[in-house]
Amino acid sequence: MSMSDTPERVRGTYNLTQEHNGNGSTFAGHVALLKTFSLLGVIFSHAVFPFTEPDPGGFWRFYADRQSEVADFINFWGGFIIIPSFMMASGYLAALSAERKRRSAPAYIAGRAKRLLVPWFLLMAFWLVPLYTIFDIPAYNRPAGYTLAQTYRVGLEGLFADHLWFLLVLFWVSIFFAALRPLANRLGGFLVPALAVVAALLVDEYGRTLTWYAVWEISGPLIWFGLGTILCRYREGIGKALARRPLSLFGLNAVLFVLTALFLTQTTQMYWLTCCLGALTAFQAFFYLARYHGRLRAFRPYRYFEDNAFRFYLFHVPGNYLIYRMLVAAGLSSPLPIMLLTFVCDLCLTACLVAVFNALERVKETYNLTQGRTGGGSL
């Protein structure tokens, strides 16, 4: 944000954001930007992960022969921002949806299962397991050399989920907050996030044995999701405060984030706090950039990605692994060109897959509509 961005101009951004976030729309421009760029960041980070320093105890199992300081830099700072920002945006949107759509707990759980668990199962069974087996891609809980039957076993047990772990985590976290929503309505907006912190501490301390279906990985996301619910509940006051003191609040948050990331992440609790500061820094940045959301939407490639960002996330793996292998086989050896080409080629490949999926979905909708008109769908 430049020094020319006066509080008056930022207040204009706030007003525009609120107008875009009217009764007929789903969410504000700054949350749309935060969610979209978080998913884009996930795809980009997966393109650079092979070039990061190997971590034998970490999630990643696919490394290049040469590492890159650029990849380590992106991995270090992105780890504090990307996933926490998406979880925070998800909490914001869930709270906003709860305000506008009063649904029973069973209806909400069914909706979350359809949105998150069905894609997890279908992609695990018909996308990840076959491709990882055919190309023998090593992954977390899926060592190189696993047969198709072995890969299906760990997949069905929720042990091998690869990037789809995020769908499982988001489902459990969503259910946790939905179950406690009556308390939030009665006792205020901070009680449930406080309970989420307690639950996160318990999972972190005692949940290491809950390895199935990513249950043990929900500790941090519980906190970041809860932070999003707070931002949504008090969005009017927060928006006015951010508009009143744009440079000082953003600068203070950014400085605290950098300091904690560099010096204070030795414990799990401080890591959670650092991720909260990173997500809040991104939230504020996109709040101030929300005035440009309409211009970005006018750019067709960006609009296509934003409208299909969730599907891009679902389909982008393992394309990046396969593209990386093709580039190496073609003779490329410098990490930076491989990282950039992997990212661009993976986006193009995924865009084709998303286009095919959308076309099939339109065919299905047309067929259902035709069946309804002709009475073919009735018994």
Image (tube, rainbow, N blue to C red):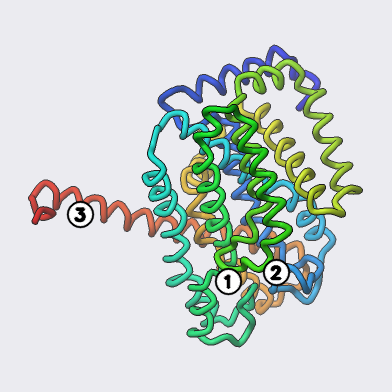
Q: Which mark is residue 55?
A: none
Identify the mark nearer the N-term, 3 or 1. Answer: 1
Q: How many marks?
A: 3
Front position in the image: 178 or 97: 178
Residue type at mark 2: give it.
Trp
Give the image quarter of residue 177. top right
Write the residue at 68% across / 18% down.
10
Left or right: 112 in relation to 288: left
Write the residue at 14% across / 52% down.
371
Residue 282 is situated, as x and y percent measured from the top left of the image, at 70, 38
Left or right: 108 in relation to 9: left
Judge the density around disc 1: few (<14), some (14-19), many (≥20) Cα neighbours within 10 Å.
Answer: some
| Residue under label 2 | 60
Q: CA distance from mark 2 to mark 1?
A: 14 Å
Residue 128 is situated, as x and y percent measured from the top left of the image, at 51, 71
Identify the mark nearer the N-term, 2 or 1. Answer: 2
Q: Is residue 244 above or below residue 335?
A: above
Q: Which mark is residue 367?
A: 3
Residue type at mark 1: give it.
Leu
Q: Which mark is residue 159?
A: 1
Residue type at mark 3: give it.
Tyr
Q: Nearer the viewer, mark 3 or mark 1?
A: 1
Q: Nearer the viewer, mark 3 or mark 2?
A: 2
Identify the mark nearer the N-term, 3 or 2. Answer: 2
Give the image quarter of residue 16. top right
Callout 3: SS: helix
Q: What quarter of the picture does the N terminus occupy?
A: top right
Judge the density around disc 3: few (<14), some (14-19), many (≥20) Cα neighbours within 10 Å.
Answer: few
